Each structure stands twice: as C-alpha cells, then as structure tokens.
Image (cartoon, rainbow, N blue to C red):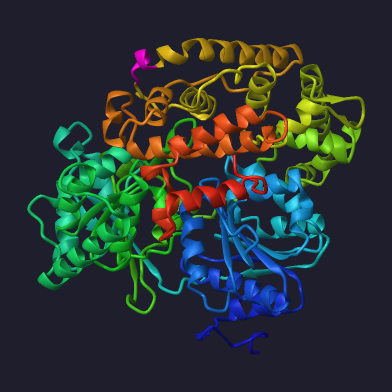
C-alpha cells in the first residue's frame, strides 16, 4: 500500500516517512519524527511551516544551540516562499514578529513564563533535536516548554532514534491534548560501514575483533603495543581518497594539535581547489573585514590552505563561520572537530573518524552512549554522492580488550530520561497562575511523573512526596527572599525575577540591594560577567585588573552569600551560584575600550569563550535595561552605555549572519526590540 500524503514538496520526492508526517500535519495532528542523522527530518519541519504560513499563522523553530539557530535563519531567509524570517538567540533579535521566528528553546520557555499572549498568532512550533530533553543541565527547558505551550499550537518534534519513543509519544499526546502521529524511520539514506583501528592491527572490521583480542592478550606487558599512532590511518584514508573526513575529538586542544600535525607534509587541495579556497577566503575578508597578515586568522589560513582545519566552541565565531563555509564547499578535506559539529549542522562527509570512544559524561570519563556515537557517525555518507558512509574508531590497547564495541556501534539506543526541574522564576510564575499549593500538579503532568508511574506505585508515591517536599522548600526560600507571599501573591522582587531566567536570584538581589548604585558601565559589565561565568579548568586571569571594582564585587558576593544562607535555612543545598571573577578582568578592560587582540594579558581563556561570555553579558544587560526602564532611568542609561561598550568587534553577531546594517543602526533596532525580547538563560 502506498503511503498517504503528498508525493513531492519543494521539488523533492518525499520518502514514505516524510509523506506520513505530512499527511498527519494536513489533519492538524502533532507529529513526532524519529529518524537517523541525515534522513531528511528537516523537510517535515519545513512542510509544517509552509502549512502554517498558508493559514496566515506564524511558526517558531527552536534549536538547542545558537549555531544551529543561525544556520536555520540563513536557510529560511533564502526560502522565497517564507515572507519574513526573525531570529532571537540572546545574542541578537531580528524581526521578532517575522512569519517564521528561529530561536533557542530557552527563549521560547522564557516567553511562556513572561507573557504567553505574544504567542497568540503562532500555529506551529518545531522542536529540533527534541531528544535534548535528556540533557542533564538544560533538558528541563524542553519539557517545560512542551507542557506550557498553548494547546492549540501544533508541535513538530524531531528526534534521533530513541528507545522509548512510544513512552515519549504517550506523554506528549497526554500533555498536549491533541493526537500525536509517531513517524519512525530506521533506514539511513546512506548506510554506514564501521571499522576499528589500532596501529598493531591496522584497519579491521568488528567481525575480526575476537581473534585480534586473542593476539593482544599475549602482549599485555609490551609497551610497544600500548603506543598510540593514528597517522598511518590518516595516510591510508588520504591515499584511498576517502575525503572529506570529520575527525571527532573530545578536547578543543586536541582538535588544534591534531590538525597542525595532520597538516605537516600534506597538501590535500588540487590547484583548482586551492584557487577556489583563496577566492572564498578573499570573499570572506571582504564580507567580514578581518585581517590575516598575522594572528589567529593568519594561522587558520595556513592550515586551511593545505585542506586541513579544526572547529570547536573555543574558536572565534568568525573562524568557525569560515571553516564551515569552506568545509561545505569541499575545500576542507580533513576537519578535526568536537561533537557539537554533529548536532543539527548539516555538513556530511565521506568518512568519520573517532579519536576515542570514551568521553566525559559530566561526572567521569566513560565509554560513550550508543545514541551519541550514532549521531556523530551519522555524518558519514553524502546523499547522492556516496554508496556507503565509512566510520573508523581509533582504539587504545585497553579498548581492544575491554571496550563494549558492539553496544556502542550497534546496540540498543538509550531512552530519553526526564530531567524535569522547575527553576525559581518558573515557580514564582506558577505562584501567580495556579497558586502555591497547586504547583506540584505541574510535576504530575511532567514526563518525569509518567516515567515514575511506569516503574511502580510505591516509587510513584515516593517521588510524589519528594517532589512536594522539594517544592515546599523552594517556596519557603522564595518567601524568605520577599518574592512571594501567601497562596497566590507575587511581590515586586518576584515580578522582577521573571525577567532574569538562569540567574534570577543573583541579579534580582543585586538590583534590590543597591549593588548597581553609582556603578560605571565597565564595572557593570565586569560584575554581570562574574554572575554568569563558570570557569573551565586551568582558567587564569590577572587579578590586579579588578582593583577598580573590587569593592563592588565584595558587596555583590555578600548579597549572594546571604541568598545562599537563606537556601540552607530552608533546607536546600545551595544552588545560587557564587561569583566567578575569572572572565571579569578581560570583560572590564574590553568595555573600557581595550582592543580584542590585547586581552591575552587579562585572561588565558579561549577567544571563543570570551566572545560567548561577552555576548551573554550583553544579553543580561538588556534584561536589566528592560527591568529598570521606567523606574531607574539613570541605571538604564548606564546599562545602555555598557551594551554599546561591549557590542563591538567579534562580539557583534551581525557579521556571522551576513547583515549589512551599520553598528549604530543595529544597536538602535535592538534597543527598540529589547522591551519585547525574552532571551535564553
């Protein structure tokens, strides 16, 4: 029997799973699509968006990372059938009333808490990478958003393959109050072929693991067998012309070190490709206005000219943008990258190499999950170009003997586990909407509650008691801070905290306790950075640079310590983050007018990390501007000046999006939008 639904869309012949999803959307069902990387899930989202546009409704497209949001903004802007496209990532707000609005999931959740009425004309919301609900730190945001969205909004959830798809769909149908059509596609458009590699065994298929393990057992005491060397593998892949290839490392530094080593003695570009590379590089220089005579862009040019590159979150956004463009054009043949490159960004390769099968899981190093492996491995194989995607795993000696290779490469994909946890701003919001005593009912509707119920009635009741007690303790804490009172009353501080998602306690307390009084713009930037920053290991900074704002920082820490003390008094292990000053000297100096190139004196953090913290600082300064606009014009003016002092050079996101307006025009536009935007935490 042929699949229902349209057979073509936007010039593409739809696969059966895409037709099934389209038919469900035609009947206004919610849709949950689970399919391998590269199978074509995005086309389902685009079909839903075009349906909503024809009905005169707006569409929202949410993504877990800003890089993916930026990419989708460019894609939709190039679609002639979409009248207008907006973008809200916290870094920037463009056309907040566009027919299609691309945003990070946090922004949508925050909008639902602050002012749900602004979504009145939204017909569909796409949740890209919805399995991100499983993320320990941010997963609760996806769950809350799915719960709080108005019931008339159609949800299109796009997911990698997960084990508990039926369970998730049952919850989604229950919480959304509308039928959910589950569309599962297990077949990859380009099949994968997996290989293993060790220098003492060469490249071999998993089927040969048993005899190789037996041989390795005989060399447990031989140090030569425990040496690592992946260069012969790269030589073989180059010789066999199995490029472009993505080489996944789980360390930023390793990406750069390996890229430099791999480039030595290699020239992977033909004369024609080298000419294409130089043309694209010069076009980028003209578009973005960067210099490459010396410094980071010069170093990157030297690597890329040989056909080798690296890509990770510590790089400048402009560097990542150029690498992505060149890789997409086929003039980067070997790219060393971290796992974020596999998250949604559509850049397939001929082959994928794993530097290691172990990664840090937030607590310890362990062998990676099947789902993570398949997400990255799924980047191998280019549709219409390759018959097979090739995946190679570099093994340590111990991996050959002990690694759960079958489970990693072809085992059962892990289920989504709920990470549901209501933050303080959401609890304050619920106080006003449902009343304090009914807040636990929100938990009853959560995916966490459904999963608890499916275990046992005893565990369900135990969870219910624990959650109720936890909520009561948090409400006691919020009452002691003066945010709420009684059953349904929200006080002034509580109303303020609704605008500071993520660091709502710290920023509200600093505002009300007078820490922002008589502060200058640069010190305000440094203080906000200390609130939001979380240092990486071995991050160092020049403490003397903080001398001008040392008194302000001490005052701020006393205020935050008081909030942490109140948490303990309420029986809660403190969750309010203390100040982290590691990035503040560099932020302070940059806000004072110091050049970006000179910031190495004030921090050893990666340039990309500085840009990320500076952009987040701008984001929270805009929150502050919105809060104090009417009541404190002086602080509003200081915050506005602080934004202007930071939002320049690589902090200015316009270049990455190909926007041509001047900085003054953009700042004016964003200032006007600041009163409407709800940014991510």
Residue 371: x percent and y percent? 50, 53
Q: Quick check: can you spot residue 436? A: yes
Q: Quadrant of the C terminus?
A: top right
20 sits left or right of 407 in the view: right
Q: Quadrant of residue 588?
A: top left
The one nearer the camera, 291 or 180, is 291
- Residue 31 lies, with reference to residue 433, above or below; the image says below
Q: Determine if the magenta segment contains residue 411.
A: no
Q: Quick check: can you spot residue 417? A: no
The residue located at (77%, 47%) in the rendering is 450
Q: Which residues are magenta?
A: 541-545
The one nearer the camera, 221 or 640, is 640
**How many circles with numbers are drawn on the protein?**
0
The residue located at (76%, 15%) in the rendering is 570
Q: Quadrant of the N terminus?
A: bottom right
The residue located at (49%, 30%) in the rendering is 363
- Residue 172 lies, with reference to residue 43, above or below; the image says above
The one nearer the camera, 219 or 531, is 531
- What secondary structure prevails in the magenta region? helix
Residue 549: x percent and y percent? 47, 15
The residue located at (18%, 59%) in the rendering is 307
Residue 641: x percent and y percent? 51, 34
The one nearer the camera, 660 or 403, is 660
- Residue 29 lies, with reference to residue 259, above or below; the image says below
- Residue 611 lies, with reference to residue 473, above or below; the image says below
Residue 643: x percent and y percent? 50, 37
């Amino acid at each position: 029997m042929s699949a229902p639904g349209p057979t073509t869309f936007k010039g593409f012949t739809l696969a059966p799973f895409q037709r099934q999803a389209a038919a469900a959307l035609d009947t206004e069902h919610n849709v949950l699509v689970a399919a391998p990387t590269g199978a074509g899930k995005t086309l389902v989202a685009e079909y839903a968006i075009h349906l909503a546009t024809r009905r005169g409704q707006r569409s929202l497209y949410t993504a877990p990372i800003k890089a993916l949001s930026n990419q989708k903004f460019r894609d939709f802007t190039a679609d002639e059938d979409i009248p207008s496209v907006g973008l809200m990532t916290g870094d920037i707000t463009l056309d907040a009333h566009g027919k299609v609005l691309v945003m990070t999931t946090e922004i949508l959740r925050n909008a639902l808490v602050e002012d749900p009425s602004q979504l009145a004309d939204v017909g569909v919301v796409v949740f890209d990478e919805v399995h991100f609900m499983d993320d320990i730190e941010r997963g609760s945001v996806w769950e809350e958003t799915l719960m709080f969205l108005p019931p008339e909004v159609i949800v299109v959830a796009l997911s990698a393959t997960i084990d508990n798809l039926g369970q998730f769909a049952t919850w989604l149908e229950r919480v959304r109050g509308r039928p959910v059509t589950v569309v599962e596609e297990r077949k990859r458009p380009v099949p994968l072929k997996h290989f293993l590699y060790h220098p003492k065994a060469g490249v071999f298929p998993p089927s040969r693991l048993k005899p190789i393990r037996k041989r390795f057992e005989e060399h447990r005491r031989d140090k030569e067998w425990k040496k690592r060397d992946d260069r012969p593998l790269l030589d073989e892949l180059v010789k066999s012309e199995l490029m472009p290839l993505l080489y996944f490392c789980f360390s930023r530094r390793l990406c750069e070190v390996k890229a430099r080593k791999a480039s030595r003695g290699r020239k992977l570009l033909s004369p024609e490709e080298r000419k294409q590379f130089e043309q694209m590089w010069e076009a980028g220089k003209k578009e973005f206005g960067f210099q490459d005579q010396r410094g980071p862009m010069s170093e990157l040019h030297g690597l890329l000219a040989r056909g080798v590159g690296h890509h990770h979150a510590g790089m400048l956004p402009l560097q990542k943008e150029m690498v992505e463009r060149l890789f997409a054009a086929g003039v980067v043949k070997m790219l060393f990258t971290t796992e974020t490159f596999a998250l949604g960004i559509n850049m397939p390769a001929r082959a994928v190499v794993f530097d290691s099968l172990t990664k840090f899981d937030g607590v310890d190093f362990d062998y990676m999950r099947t789902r993570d492996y398949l997400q990255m491995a799924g980047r191998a194989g280019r549709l219409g170009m390759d018959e097979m995607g090739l995946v190679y795993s570099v093994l340590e000696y111990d991996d050959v003997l002990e690694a759960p290779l079958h489970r990693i490469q072809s085992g059962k994909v892990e289920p989504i586990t709920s990470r549901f946890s209501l933050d303080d701003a959401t609890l304050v919001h619920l106080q006003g909407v449902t009343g304090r005593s009914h807040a636990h009912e929100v938990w009853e509707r959560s995916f966490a509650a459904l999963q608890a119920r499916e275990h046992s009635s005893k565990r369900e009741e135990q969870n219910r008691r624990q959650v109720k007690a936890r909520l009561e303790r948090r409400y006691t804490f919020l009452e002691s801070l003066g945010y709420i009172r009684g059953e349904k009353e929200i006080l002034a501080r509580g109303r303020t905290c609704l605008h500071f998602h993520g660091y709502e306690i710290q920023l509200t307390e600093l505002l009300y306790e007078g820490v922002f009084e008589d502060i200058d713009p640069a010190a305000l930037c440094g203080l906000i950075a200390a609130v939001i920053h979380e240092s990486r290991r071995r991050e160092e900074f020049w403490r003397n640079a903080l001398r001008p704002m040392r008194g302000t920082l001490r005052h701020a820490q006393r205020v935050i310590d008081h909030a942490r003390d109140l948490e303990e008094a309420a029986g809660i292990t403190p969750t309010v983050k203390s100040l982290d000053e590691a990035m503040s000297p560099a932020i302070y100096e940059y806000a004072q007018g110091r050049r970006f190139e000179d910031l190495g004196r004030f921090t050893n953090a990666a340039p990309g990390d500085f840009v990320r913290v500076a952009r987040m600082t701008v984001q929270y300064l805009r929150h502050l501007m919105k809060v104090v606009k009417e009541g404190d014009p002086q602080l509003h003016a200081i915050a506005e000046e602080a934004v202007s002092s930071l939002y320049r050079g690589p902090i200015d996101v316009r270049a990455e999006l190909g926007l041509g307006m001047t900085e003054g025009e953009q700042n004016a536009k964003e200032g006007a939008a600041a009163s409407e935007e709800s940014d991510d935490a």
